[in-house]
Image: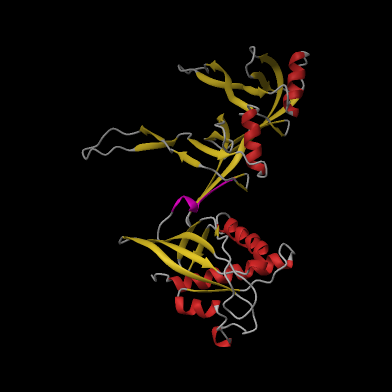
Amino acid sequence: MKIYRPQEIANKVASELNDLAVTLYENQTILTKFVFKGTADFSIYERYITGEYNLSDGIDDQQKIIPFIIGSISASQEAEDYYTRYEEEFGIRFYPYVNEKNDFEVLLREYVNLENTTNRVIDLDGYRVEKITGFPAIDDKIYPPQDGSNEYRFHVELGFIWNFASGIVTSKDINVYIDNQLVPYNTLSFVVEKRNINTLSLDATGIARYLSSVMPFNIVMSLPYLEDNPKSRELFMDAWGKIYNKKYTLRITVGQYVDYTDEVFLSSASVVDIRPSIVNFEVALTRVPKKTEILIDTLVAPVLQFNIKSESQTNSIVNINEEQSKELHISSNFSISLSVAVDENDLDPIVTSYLTKTLERNFGGASTIQLKRNNIDITYDVILINGEYEFSVDSNSTLDLTFVKRDDI
């Protein structure tokens, strides 16, 4: 792949500055119509600052320009067989007019801000370019005009580093979304574990057959508390409010080919404020290991534990002239036990209903329970026969419910 030379960088920077100048002028942030022209050739730069340019330079000879010269300060390259990566540091010197100094500073500071935020990472002809842009150094010295005008000028210097990469993935290629909202983060770590259950004895080759069972895993993120980011604010408030049973949709993209989505819930959080600094907090998001929903009376319930016990009633009979008995099926029955999370400060509607029934000892009413777990989807017609509301001081509360089959079905 090609190596970008300073003149090509100068052309791109000039194009970006001219586009920004038009935008800021049109929205009246600045009152000056700036036109930038950059070069990596000092002889051409001298012609620009002395006004010796014309249409052959792509500039109207009556047009005022802000010339700048760019130079390479240092460069390094990693020689690898599988990817291309090189880094180059550049320096720019601008030569703007003194009477336009205020507008020029506004424009240049906005350009630097965009380069360090929105435009920090760009795609450029197959390269992924990561930029590090310094702050401009504005010279207080005033220079007399050299272009035959009466307008004095001053110098501004700006340094930046462009890191060119092709064929590799860096942390800037990783994006984290919570409920489809992009969430900025500082660090991200997760470990996927699995448990192997040996289902066959070893054969002669020493190879066993294993049943792989994926275990839950934790994703730990450190992120800044950003009030303008809805999900950053929500995660912080959930952590602060100790809301640990709430489910989120987590999506992580890595480069072009990895796009992972799963359901998680907040399992732990910590906030550490070291002054002076941006407030950061850490959350551990635990994968929900199974896709399970339990609905009571058609409403999703915050069920912590589910158990169903099915049984059949039979009777042994012996027919005449037969020596062996036979089992005769008489009836079948089942019971369902549920443990439901209770948040007294924010009661779920279905929890409210059954907590009230338990406290008021109101049993026997018709209910339905629907179990959705992976490919299982089955509905039971039941009645409530037992309820137990349990908590200890300063702990989470639970509501244990027992249902049995309805006889009228």
Residue 173's x, y, as percent? 49, 53
Residue furthest left as drawn:
204
- Queried whether the magenta region covers residue 176, the answer comes back as yes
Q: Is residue 373 above or below residue 74?
A: above
Quarter of the image for the C terminus: give it: top right
Q: Is residue 119 above or below residue 151?
A: above
Camera-side residue of 212 and 173: 173
Residue 65's x, y, as percent? 61, 75
Count of numbered badges drawn on the protein: 0
- Queried whether the magenta region covers residue 24, the answer comes back as no
> Can you see residue 48?
yes
When asked about the image quadrant of residue 303, the answer is: top right
Camera-side residue of 368 and 311: 368
- Residue at 75%, 28% (x, y): give it: 349
- Residue at 48%, 59% (x, y): give it: 160
Residue stretch rendered in magenta on the structure:
170-177
Residue 342's x, y, as percent? 68, 22
Camera-side residue of 311 and 249: 249
- Residue at 63%, 12% (x, y): give it: 392
Quarter of the image for the N terminus: give it: bottom left
Residue 74's x, y, as percent? 38, 62
Q: Is residue 291 left or right of residue 297?
A: left
Q: Is residue 70 left or right of residue 263?
A: left
Q: Is residue 234 above or below residue 408?
A: below
> Can you see residue 334?
no
Q: How is the image coloured?
A: secondary structure
Camera-side residue of 331 and 217: 217
When asked about the image quadrant of residue 378, the answer is: top right
